[in-house]
Amino acid sequence: MAKQVLVIGGGVAGSSAAYRLARDGVGVTLVDAEHEGQATAAGAGIISAGRVLHASEDDEWRRFFQDATTYHRQLVLDLASLCGSEIGYRVVGELLVTPGEGGEARLADLASRLEMLNATWRDPQIGTVRLLSPAEARKLFPPLDPALGAVHMSGVARLDGRLFRHALQSAVAQLGGRRVSGEAIIRGRAGGPPVVELEGETLEADAVIVAAGAWTKRLLAPLGARIPIEPQRGQIIHLALPGTATASFPVVSGYGSNYMVTFPPDRVVVGATRETGSGFDCRATAGGVQELLTRALGVAPGLSCASLTEIRVGFRPVSADERPILGAVPGFEGLFLATGFGPSGLTLAPYSAALVAAAAGGTESPGPREVDDILEPFSPGRFGPAA
Ligand SMILES: Cc1cc2nc3c(=O)[nH]c(=O)nc-3n(C[C@H](O)[C@H](O)[C@H](O)COP(=O)(O)OP(=O)(O)OC[C@H]3O[C@@H](n4cnc5c(N)ncnc54)[C@H](O)[C@@H]3O)c2cc1C
């Protein structure tokens, strides 16, 4: 009989794991509690490796990001041909701006660093790097401050996290997988994989992948498994610019950890707060909204006439060392994790979860090397014994 894998969590991580399992002929059940504050439903949707390539000195980490974006591009094509769903995906490029004193010199420095990195990494996610004059930058993103030049990276993409999750789950159903709603509860162990219940019924499986995002620690508590992962609240504002077609505008970033990303027909998404220690407090706050609008209008005063249409709140799952937690949990038979994606899950989770799916389902590696080798630096065991 084909192997049966249970995936807990229907955000981008769990949906991606379930998709890969169903695609590879493994029996899969996906359970989702649809908690308020699901990170995937709030995520801005920027798909980029560029920031890590220029901010990190860790080549292994850079390589992982690059492999993740390579996988991502193929996945977008595969989903389109399988279910044809619109996921809001588009390569729009990114403008990096450096407002404030010494901004021009910092911009020139950033452009030359990115060009150098690009020569080594040749990442399609970066694409072509160009230093733009204020007039050229404003042509691409008209609300921008007329005094700001920018560095343009042509390869950055964006998508709609909600549509992406929906497309992955539709593909799972189309490929014969099962999706159920409700809160899974782990009851303990009985000499095999964890015993998981949903509304009083045991869900039988040969392996369990926990992709429960910020709720992972809570779910695993009955097992006594120690996994250092906490919720980090992110508030994000949706604006509309009636009469302005925003679909092709590039992402704008570089001003702190904030950014703007646009969607058709006239949406401008302004993100995002990073509130460590927030717990599961789902509220949008006056301070959060003030921070986002002050920073966005500081670089793009042309947005001051936009309508404020929505505020979303999500909990990023952040691990103790801010890297994903992936693979088998040492000391717990049949238990795998795919979580800890922090601010980059829409970019990283599809590949990461496919690796975990291959480890749990015993199928072929989706990456350039053996699954165990790729997953080793992200093992739950790196934080010490989980049991
Ligand atoms: C404001 C904001 C902006 C972001 N922008 C970007 C971006 O531009 N680019 C990018 O790459 N990333 C971005 N991210 C990060 C990205 O959204 C997250 O890293 C990613 O969505 C995490 O996905 P996940 O599946 O691990 O968790 P989630 O999406 O939170 O999903 C976890 C799921 O598990 C379910 N669950 C939990 N416990 C149980 C249980 N017991 N039983 C059943 N189901 C359960 C929950 O209900 C939930 O549906 C952003 C995040 C935020 C908050």
Image (tube, rainbow, N blue to C red):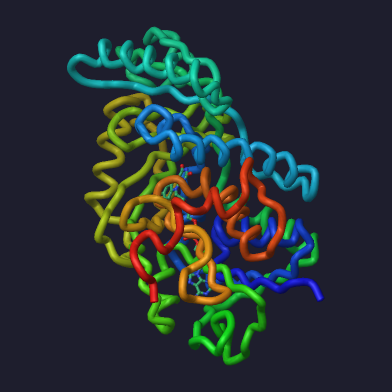
Q: Residue at x 48, y 15 (%)?
A: 129
User: Which picture quadrant has residue 155?
Assistant: top right
The foreground one among 250 and 207 is: 207
Q: Residue furthest bottom?
A: 200
> Compared to 184, does 107 lie above or below?
above
The foreground one among 319 and 100 is: 319
Q: Residue furthest left?
A: 101
Quadrant housing the C terminus: bottom left
Question: Relative to residue 26, is residue 109 drawn left or right?
Answer: left
**Is residue 383 visible to us here?**
yes
User: Which picture quadrant has residue 80?
Assistant: top right
Question: Relative to residue 287, is residue 122 drawn left or right?
Answer: right
Q: Picture coordinates of residue 302 (x, y %)? A: 37, 24
User: Which picture quadrant has residue 222?
Assistant: bottom left
Q: Residue at x 67, y 50 (%)?
A: 365
**Is residue 92 visible to us here?**
no
> Compared to 269, does 285 lie above or below?
below
Q: Picture coordinates of residue 126 (x, y %)? A: 51, 24
Q: Residue at x 38, y 47 (%)?
A: 236
Q: How many marks?
A: 0
The foreground one among 314 and 175 is: 175
Q: Picture coordinates of residue 147 (x, y %)? A: 30, 12
Q: Picture coordinates of residue 274 (x, y %)? A: 30, 49
Question: Relative to residue 285, is residue 16 drawn left or right?
Answer: right
Q: Residue at x 56, y 70 (%)?
A: 8
The foreground one among 79 and 234 is: 79
> Compared to 150, does 329 lie above or below?
below
Quadrant housing the N terminus: bottom right
> Compared to 146, does 334 lie above or below?
below
